[in-house]
Amino acid sequence: MKILVPVKRVIDYNVKARVKADKTGVDLANVKMSMNPFDEIAVEEAIRKKEAGQAEEIIAVSIGPAQAQETLRTALAMGADRAILIQTDDIVEPLAVAKLLKAVVDAEQPGLVILGKQAIDDDSNQTGQMLAALLGWPQGTFASIVKVVGDGIEVTREVDGGLETVALTLPAIVTTDLRLNEPRYASLPNIMKAKKKQLDVKTAADYGVDISPRLKTLKVEEPAKRAGGIKVKTIEELVDKLKNEAGVI
Amino acid sequence: MDFSLTPEQEAVRRAIEKLCVPFDDAYWLARDTDAQFPEEFVRAVIDGGWLGIAMPEEVGGAGLGVTEAALMMHAISRSGAGFSGASAVHMNIFGLNPVVVFGTAEQRRRILPRIIRGEDRACFGVTEPDAGLNTTAIKTRAERVGNGYVINGKKVWTSTAQTANKILILVRTTPREQCAKPTLGLSLFYTDLDRRYCDVREIHKMGRASVDSNEVFIDGLPVPEEDRIGEEGRGFEYLLHGLNPERVLIAAECVGLGQAALAKAAHYAGERIVFDRPIGKNQAVQHPLALDWMQLEAAFLMVLKAASLYDRGEPCGAEANAAKYLSAEAGFTACQNAVLTHGGFGYAKEFHVERYMRESMLGRIAPVSPHMILNFIGERVLGLPKSY
C-alpha cells in the first residue's frame, strides 16, 4: 500500500503572528516557517505504518511556494520516500487543495491519505473532509489511534463526548489529532539521504485544476487584548459580580 | 553575496533545535546544580548521528563542513544548553580533525566510526600547567620503548576526561633544544586513556559544572606505534590545522549563549512592571539590549565568514580569531546585561541568566585569550612588532 501525506508550510508555531499594517493578512516577511505540526504527526504515522510492514511507499505532497521544497525535504528526512511539490505563489483555498490532492490521488493510487486535521495558519479544518467527499472515500477524522485491521483500518477519533472508534474500508482518508503520536526529528544521516530522494515539481495546470480563489478576505485583525482579572474576597462577592457585572447567571 | 543558509544548513539548524527541545532550562539548571554529565543529551546527539557532521562519509560521517558544524553548535548553545551542552559534545565534533586529515586509512577506519557511534569518547590533552598558551614549551614526553612509546607528564584543562576512554594527546618526542625550531619535535597520539597509568583529577570551576575539566597525571602510559597520528615530530603542525575550526565553533557557541541570554532579558524587560510600566520601556534598559543584538549578529557574520573561508580551503586565521574575540566579548556582554536587566532576580539561579554569565567567561578565556588574539591581529594582520 502507498500512503500519501500532504504537508503544508506554515508560520512556525512558536512565532507570535503579527497582522500587516493594512490588515490584509498576517505579516510573513522574515518570519520562521515550518511544517504544520499536525502534518508532522501525519508523516510520523505513515512512517510507523511502513516500519510495521503495513505500507510500502510514502509520498509527501505540498502545495505552495518554492520554499515548500524545504518542508518536503523535512518529510523526506523523517522517512518519506519521495515528494511532489505543486508549486504556486497564489493563495490556495481548502477546496482547491482538495481538488489538487484528488488529482494526485488519481495519479498515484494510494491506499491511505493521512492529513493533518487542520493547518495552524488558517485553521480551516476542511481539506481532509473535502478530499474524502471528492473521492467518495470513507474518512476517519481527528484520529488519536490508527490501526490496520484485516483489509481496513480502525480509527479512534477524539470527539466532544470522548473517544469514538470507526472501522473504515480502504482506500480511506485519515486526519490526525495531536495525540496520535509524537513525531520524530530527523537524524543527520537521514537529512543527508533526503537530499538524494526524488522531488518532482509540478504546477496546478499539470493536473488541470483551477485554483482561483472563491473566498474574499475582508479584513484581518489582532484578537482583542485580554484585560487582567481581579481577585474576589468572598463567594458572595463572586456571585454578585457574575450576576450584576458579567450578567452570566 | 548571499547571506541566506542553504536548505541543507537550514535543515541542520532545525533538526538540532528540535533535538534540544526536551532539554529545557530546568534540565540544564539541574545539571549545573548536581554537576552530573548531561548523558541523556549527549545520547540524543549521538543517536541523531550528529557527531559525524564534519567527518568524511567513508567513515560514517555526513561530510559537511565547518559552517554546518558551527550552525549545529550555535543552535545547541542558543537552545539554553550553553556551554553545558556544547562542551559535552564539542571535542567529538571537530577535535579529531588531525585524525581525519593526517591519519592513515586504517586509523580513520579504526578511530572515527566508533566516535560517531558514541562507542568511544575522546578528550584532548594539549595544555600543560607550566606552558599555558606557549604550547611548544610543553614538558610531557613520549620515549621510544621497543615498538612503541611510553608517556610521562601532566596535562591540565582536559575536558570530559572523567567519562572519556580515549585521549588525543600532544607530547614532546624530541627535546626542544635538539630541534631546529621549537615547533618541531612534538608528536600527536590518539590512544586509550588507561586509568592504570593516568590519574584524572577534576578541577572545580566557576561555571559549566556538568562538563568536567581535569588535570591528568600520566605515569608510564604505554602507547603502541599505530596510535601515533602522522609523522613523529610534526604534531604541532597537525594541531594547528584544527585550530581555526576550533575557534569558529567556540565562537558560534558564544554567540548562541549570548542570544539565549538576550532572549531571556528582552522577555523579562517586556513583562516586568516597575513604576507602572514595563522596565523595557526605559531606554537605559532597552538600549543595552538593542546593542547586544547588533553585536551578536555582527559577531555571527564573522563566524560564518571564517567558516565559509575554511570550507573553501582559503586562509582564515585572522577571521577565525576575530570571530572568536568578537563572539566571546558580545556573548559575555549580553549575559552580563541579561543579569542586570533581571535586577535581583538575575542573581537568582532559577532565572538562568546568572548561569549563562558564569559560562560566558569560558568563551573569553578558551581556547585562546582575547589578549593573544589582539597580539595575533596586531602582528599578523597589521604587521606590527611582536610585543612578547
Image (cartoon, helix red, strand yellow):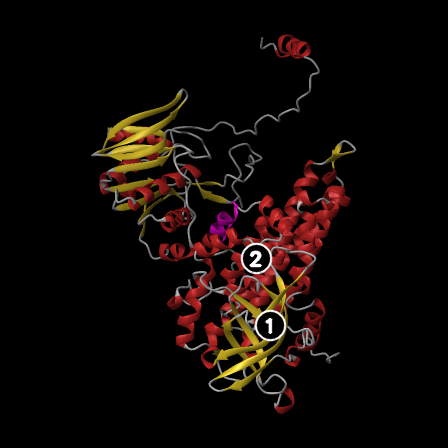
Q: Residue A33's x, y, as percent?
A: 48, 44
Q: Chain of mark 2?
A: B
Could you classify mark 1 by the number of other residues whose Cα lies within 10 Å: few (under 14), some (14-19), or many (20 or more)? many
Q: Chain of mark 1?
A: B
Identify the image quadrant of the C terminus of chain B.
Answer: bottom right
Task: Name the secondary structure under disc 2.
Answer: helix
Residue B87 falls in which quadrant of the image? bottom right
The residue most toward the left is A151
Task: Answer whether residue B16 is magenta in the image.
Answer: yes
Task: Name the secondary structure under disc 1.
Answer: helix
Residue at image x 61%, y 60%? B212
Which residue type does callout 2 highlight?
Ala
Q: Is residue B283 above or below residue B10?
A: above
- Left or right: B54, with A222 as reference point: left
Residue B154 visible from this viewpoint? yes
Residue B3 visible from this viewpoint? no
Q: Which residue is labeled 2 in the image?
A: B86
Residue at image x 29%, y 32%? A173
Q: Is residue B348 above or below residue B321?
A: above
Residue at image x 74%, y 38%? B279
Q: Is residue B201 above or below residue B6?
A: below
Q: Which residue is labeled 1 in the image?
A: B317
Task: Answer whether residue A6 is magenta in the image.
Answer: no
| Earlier-in-chain disc, 2 versus 1 | 2
User: Which SS does the magenta portion mostly show?
Assistant: helix
Which residue type does callout 1 highlight?
Gly
Q: Residue B8's x, y, as percent?
A: 44, 56
**How much space separates mark 2 and mark 1, taking CA atoms?**
23 Å
Residue at image x 66%, y 69%? B368
Range of residues picked out in magenta: B13-22
- Left or right: B68, with B261 as reference point: left
Disc assigned to residue B140: none
